[in-house]
Image: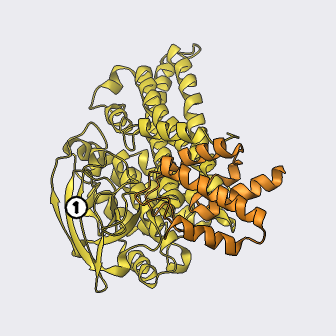
Chain colours: A orange, B yellow
Amino acid sequence: MSAFTFVRLDARRASSGVLRLRTMDVTAKIRRILKEHGRLSLDADTLALNADLYEAGMTSHASVNVMLALEGEFDLEFPDHMLKRSVFDSIASISAAIGELQAAAA
Amino acid sequence: MSGNSNEFNALLAAVKAIATNVAAPAAPDVDARARFPQETIDALRQARVLSAAVPKELGGAGCGMRELALLCVALAQACGSSAMVLAMHFIQVACLARHGRDSTFFRGYLQDLVRNQYLLASMTSENGTFGETRTSICAVERANGRFTLAKDATTGSYCSYAEGILVTARRASDAPGSDQVLVLVRKDDCRLTQTTTWDTLGMRGTVSPGFKLESSGAEEQILPGSFADSSAQTMVPYSHILWSALWWGICADAVARAAECVRAGARKNPGSVPPTALRLAEVSTQLQSMRHNWHSLAAEFDAITTRPAGLEELLAIGWALKMNNLKVSASEAAPQIVHKALQIAGIVAYKNDTKFSLGRHYRDVLSASLMISNERIAAKSASMLLVLKDT
């Protein structure tokens, strides 16, 4: 699947243009961070949104680096109750967590 | 101890009797010859202790973490190696009981374990992973409802004496090293070839040389779910709490021997407190805080598991850090405590053939910081603290 397919998928899911842009932006940033820090055995660009990142080779050590990079990139802090496997096990769940924190801050 | 069931009290009394009558007299020989404590394990089988961690619904005693820890402590006060074998067995049983609950095969296997009092071992280390248990090189291959699995393990505690071995492996030949499963390999499913020896400073009775394992069996013997979850939710907490408890048991016996020496000295000269009594007071402080550490985390674990979201809570970084801290602090405290006991008791404890001898205790607890190296744990804690806010 290409990045273009994802844009179209996101577009179908998003209810408004603004949200679509935000989701695209967030997802692209997450993919870049996973590429740099996730140490995946698969290509982060072509990974499905709900593919299991741990099954794709992310270790718990690598996941901490992903968390740190996400906190830096999005200028937010994951509260301790979010620091668990299920929050970081897919691009979709990471994106949902970021959305939740950004909505709370807005 | 309040709140113990009669069933548990009977089990604890049985283990205490086995500790005194079987494990303690055998301990020097087990240690000297680095041999498996067969008589102690047979006695535990006889008393049905090996099914203590199996849920009641499957015929076991359904003991919680605190209860299992107390059983390990009772045995550790007599023989550290026997207690380590019992603790490791409980850890494996807990993995099957907590993660195989929805599998007809594993429910049946646990019922068999209750009936036959099977002993379970594990094989989580591997040549080439350098002690990182959360990575595997070997992979389980599946075809036509069967699996095959070959592993080159650096250590395999009491594997030659167990009825079943839980083996970590990659989920499939194309899975990354961290995507692991646990496979139950039964004695009849495998061929074990010993590759190294087990002539160690301590914990000699665990008989843990390296092995090459070749196995095959039914696909249903692969534990459902991923080892990532069963490791965080069961193997790590059971290991670190039960190990800390048994290291404490070894320390408690060492301090008890030192205290007996101090009392003997005091009786010779009533009216003056011997100088060694002050050292005894110091070491008892350390012994108490070590006990509180494992005891409170065992109680916390038992409380967590009663909550509906309990399994999820055990996956949080905050809990993983607590487990790391427990393991590191208990394994660092244990040799210090035994060392102090040795200073108090003096030459009678330094000698290997007195009733105050502490050589075996000392050598046994030196394993604590090495089995899952504290260095590796500290590195993981350090990285967790980079994201954890409220410690």
Location of residue B236 with respect to B262 vertically, above or below: below
Sort mark 1 into few (<14), some (14-19) or many (20+) by Cα contacts within 10 Å: some
Q: Residue sitting at 62 percent across and 59 percent down?
A: A27
Left or right placement of residue B112 versus residue B233 in this view = left
Q: Residue sitting at 72 percent across and 65 percent down?
A: A20
Indicate the position of residue B15 as horizontal and vertical percent values.
45, 58
For the C terminus of chain B, the image quarter is top right
Location of residue B58 with respect to B307 vertically, above or below: below
Indicate the position of residue B129 as horizontal and vertical percent values.
31, 49
Viewer-side residue, B192 vs A38 = A38
Q: Helix, strand or loop at disc 1?
A: helix
Indicate the position of residue A73 as horizontal and vertical percent values.
65, 44
Left or right placement of residue B245 versus residue A9 in this view = left
Name the residue at the right extreme.
A106
Left or right placement of residue B264 versus residue B122 in this view = right
Residue B60 can be seen in this image: yes
* Residue at numbered disc 1: B160
Viewer-side residue, A87 vs B4 = A87
Indicate the position of residue B99 as horizontal and vertical percent values.
50, 71
On what subunit does the disc labeled 1 rest?
Answer: B
Give the residue type that dot 1 points to: Ser
